[in-house]
Image (cartoon, rainbow, N blue to C red):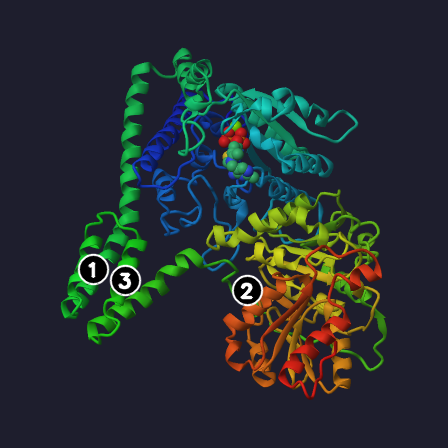
Amino acid sequence: MKTNPNTKTEITFEDFKAEVINDYKLAVTSRECSLLGRREVLTGKAKFGIFGDGKEVPQIAWAKAFENGDFRSGYYRDQTFMMAIGELTIEQFFAGLYANTDLKEEPMSAGRQMGGHFATHSLDENGNWKNLTEQKNSSADISPTAGQMPRLLGLAQASKIYRNVEGIDTTNFSKNGDEIAWGTIGNASTSEGLFFETINAAGVLQVPMVISIWDDEYGISVHARHQTTKENISEILKGFQREDDTNGYEIFRVNGWNYAELIDTYQRAAKVARKEHVPVMIHVQELTQPQGHSTSGSHERYKNEERLAWEAEYDCNAQMRQWMIDNNIATDEELITLEKDIKKAVRDGKKAAWASFINPIKAEKQEALSLIENVANTSSNSVFITKLKNDLEAIDEPLRKDILSSARKTLRYVISEDSNEKLVLQNWINSYIEKIQPKYSSHLYSESKLKAEYQSEILPTYSNDATEVDGRVILRDNFEAVFNKYPEALVFGEDAGHIGDVNQGLEGLQEKFGELRISDTGIREATILGQGIGMAMRGLRPIAEIQYLDYILYALQIMSDDLATVQYRTKGRQKAPLIVRTRGHRLEGIWHSGSQMGGILNLIRGIHVLVPRNMTKAAGFYNTLLESDEPALIVECLNGYRLKEKMPNNIGEFKTPIGVVETIKEGEDITLVSYGSTLRLVEQAAKELLEVGIDAEIIDVQSLLPFDLNHDIVKSVAKTNRVMVIDEDVKGGSSAYILDQILNEQNAFQYLDSQPKTLAAKPHRPAYGTDGDYFSKPSVEDIFEAVYDVMHEVSPSDYPKLR
Ligand SMILES: Cc1ncc(C[n+]2csc(CCOP(=O)(O)OP(=O)(O)O)c2C)c(N)n1
Ligand SMILES: [Mg+2]
C-alpha cells in the first residue's frame, strides 16, 4: 500500500508496520485527550468540551493526503487531523479547553474560541504573510454549523485563479494552483442551505475542493431520518457525479472504521482534485460518537441499546486495533503497553497545560493580595477589606475575574480615605486592566502597518478641461486602473461579468481582464461572500459584489460570523481583506431601497462600513482599501450612477480616507449629520432653511465604521450647539448608532443647547412609488420641519410654529 502520494516505490512491510503503529498511537492519543477533556469539564476546570472521539481514523487517512499549501475549512470534530498534521499537541489541546490567552500556548485563538475550533497561522506577529506553500493550513473554524462551507469554496477557487491567471506573485500562496481546499462537515449539518449552495457552486466552478462528510447518523440527538432525505446524503447527491461530457463531482463512499479503505479513498480523492481541479465528495459513513455530542449532555438519552452496542463494536479505533492484530502488525500485549504509555503522556500533557494556564494567574493573585493587604492595614475598614483578601486567598485556582473583582471592591471601602497604599492599588488596577484587556479585545481590526486608517487621503485632481460624466464611468475607469495595477484583484457577482454589472460600473472589463477576474456568479449571496473570504485568506484581493444592499441579508450571517471575526478569532494570525461591493439607498419599494444599515452596522463589527455619497468618493475607497489589509463593505448610492461628476485625471490613484468625515456646508445654527443618498435631501433642505434664516452645517459621515476618528463632529457641535442625525434607516438604527458616537464617544453633551435629535424613516419597509418613498422615508419637508422645530423651541418669536 502506498501511504505517501509522493513515494513512487512500494514501501517495505516493516516501514508499513511502523507507519500503522504510529497512526494508531495518534488515534489513541487523540481519544485519550477527548476522554480526559470531558473529565476536565465535568470537574469544573474547563467550561465546555466538544471533541473528536469516534472520528479519529478517517482524519489520519485524510492527513496523509494533505500537502503543504493545502487548506482546511472544517469543524469541531477535527482534532485528530490537526494532531496528524503537526499543528496540535496534547498541551495545546488542553490549553484550548482552559482558554489560555497566551498565543504561544494556545495557537488556535489565544483562548478566544472554545476548544475544538482550529486554526494555523497565516500571518507572523507583525501581520505579514508567512509562506503558506511551506506549511499546512487551516482556516479558523467558526461554530455555526455549515458556516465553514462558503469559505471552503473560496479557498478552493484560489487555486484555480493561481493556476490560470497570469501576472500574480504566487510566491507565498501557490505552486501552480496545486493546492486542495479540504472541507469537513457533520452529516446533520448538510441539512443547512449553505451546504447545498456551496456544493452546487463548486460543481459549477470546478475547483479543487474535497469535502468529507463525517456521518455518525446523528446531529446531537436528532437522527438522520429527520435530517436527510433517504437518510443518505451521498445517495441524494448522486446527480452531481460527473459524467464523460459534464462537469460535476467525484463522489466516494467509505466506512469510517476501515483504515485501509480510507487511506486508499483519500489518495484517490486528492489525485482527482489536485490534478484536474474537480471537486470531490467523500461520504464517510458508519462513524460513532463514543462520548456523545459534547459535554452538555449524554447520548444514552437518545441512542438505544442496540445503537450503543453497535457504536462500541464499530468504534473506529477499536476496529483499527483489531485489524492490526489480525494482520500481524501488533499483538494485543504490545498494544496494551502502548495504550498505557499514551494515557500517561496525555495525563502529563494535561498537567503541564494546566500549570502554564494557572501559574501566571496565581502570580497575579499574589500581587493583588499583597496590595489589598497593604490597604487593609492602613484603612479604618480593615475588617471588611481583610475579608475580601481572605476570600481571594482561599481560591486555590483563581481566575482573573476573582482577582480584579476583589481589588476593585476593595476601593469601595476606602472611598473617603487617602493613603499611599490606596494609590498603589488604584494604579495597579488600572495597569492590570490595561495589560489584560487586550487579551480579550485586541485585533477586532488589523493591528498591522497596513491598517486602513493609516492610508492617508489623496485628493482627486482635475484638469482645466475636465468633463462631466455619469458617476458610473468614474467607477468603471477606476476599476480598470485597479485591475491593471493589482493582478491579484478580481471581482465577481450576479451580472458582474458579461454585462459589467447592472449599472455598468464594470462595463467592458471582462473583455479586457478575462472571465476568471471579472466573473458572473449564480444567485447565491452567501457563497459569493465565501468565495471572497477564502480567496482573500490565500492572498488574492477579491471584490465580492452583492447586487443590491437589500439582498445582503443572505450573506450577512457569513459576514457577521466569519468575515468580521477572522482577525479577532485568530488574534491577528489570519486575515481576509475582502471588499464587499454593493449598492443601495433610496430606490423603490420594500426590497429595493436598501436602508437596513443599523442591522448591518451592529452585526459586522470587524468590517469597515463605508457609505460614499458619490462615485468619486466610492472609487477613492476602493483605492484606499486595496492598499490596506482589512475587509470592508462599500455601499454605492443606487441613484448616483447616472448623476454627473467631474472626471478626475488621477484615476486609480486618489484615495478617500477611512474614518474621516467631511463638512460639505458650513453653518452656524445646527449641525446636520447624514450620509449617502439622504445627503442630497439634507442639502436641499439646508438651502430652503437658509431662506427662513436658519444656517445649518452639514457633515457627511462617509465612513460609519470606523466613525469620525478625528472627532470633527463634536467640533462642529461646539460651534452650533445643536445636532440632528438624519438617515433613511428605521429609528434606533444607524441614526441611533451615530448619535451614540457623538454623545458618548465625543462627549458632545456639554456643548448642547437643544435636545439632540434623530430623524429616521417609518418603522415599516419603504412603500413602492414616489409617494411610497415620501411617506416612508425622511423627505426634504420632513427635514426642513424637524430642523425648524428645533429652532422654534430656541426662539418661538423668531421661528413661529409652522403647523
Ligand atoms: C447554525 C447552528 N445551528 C445549531 C447549532 C448547534 N449545534 C451544534 S453542533 C449541532 C449538531 C451537528 O451535527 P452534525 O453536523 O451531524 O455533526 P456532529 O456533531 O454529529 O459531528 C448543532 C445542532 C450550531 N452550532 N449552529
Ligand atoms: Mg453527526
Residue 67 visible? The answer is: no
Say whether mark 1 is within 8 Å of ligand 1.
Answer: no
Indicate the amino acid at tag 1: Leu
Say whether mark 2 is within 8 Å of ligand 1.
Answer: no
Q: Secondary structure at mark 1?
A: helix
**Where in the figure is residue 111, as x and y percent of width and height?**
40, 48
Is residue 120 toward the left or the right of residue 653 in the image? Answer: left
Q: Quadrant of residue 673?
A: bottom right
Residue at image coords 71%, 69%: 617
**Which quadrant is home to the C terminus?**
bottom right
Q: Which mark is residue 26?
A: none
Front of the two marks 1 and 2: 1
The residue that mark 2 highlights is 451
Is residue 626 toward the left or the right of residue 320 in the image? Answer: right
Please report contact status of discs 1 and 2: CB closer than 8 Å, yes or no.
Answer: no
In space, the residues marked 2 and 3 are separated at their CA atoms by 38 Å
Indicate the amino acid at tag 3: Lys
Q: Which mark is residue 369?
A: 1
Indicate the amino acid at tag 2: Lys
In space, the residues marked 1 and 2 are separated at their CA atoms by 40 Å
**Where in the figure is residue 694, as x and y percent of width and height?**
71, 85
**Where in the figure is residue 655, as x and y percent of width and height?**
67, 70
Residue at image coords 15%, 62%: 383
The residue that mark 3 highlights is 409
Label 2: few (<14), some (14–19) or many (≥20) C-alpha neighbours in 10 Å: some
Q: Nearer the viewer, residue 93 or 67?
A: 93
Q: Earlier in the sequence, mark 2 or mark 3?
A: 3
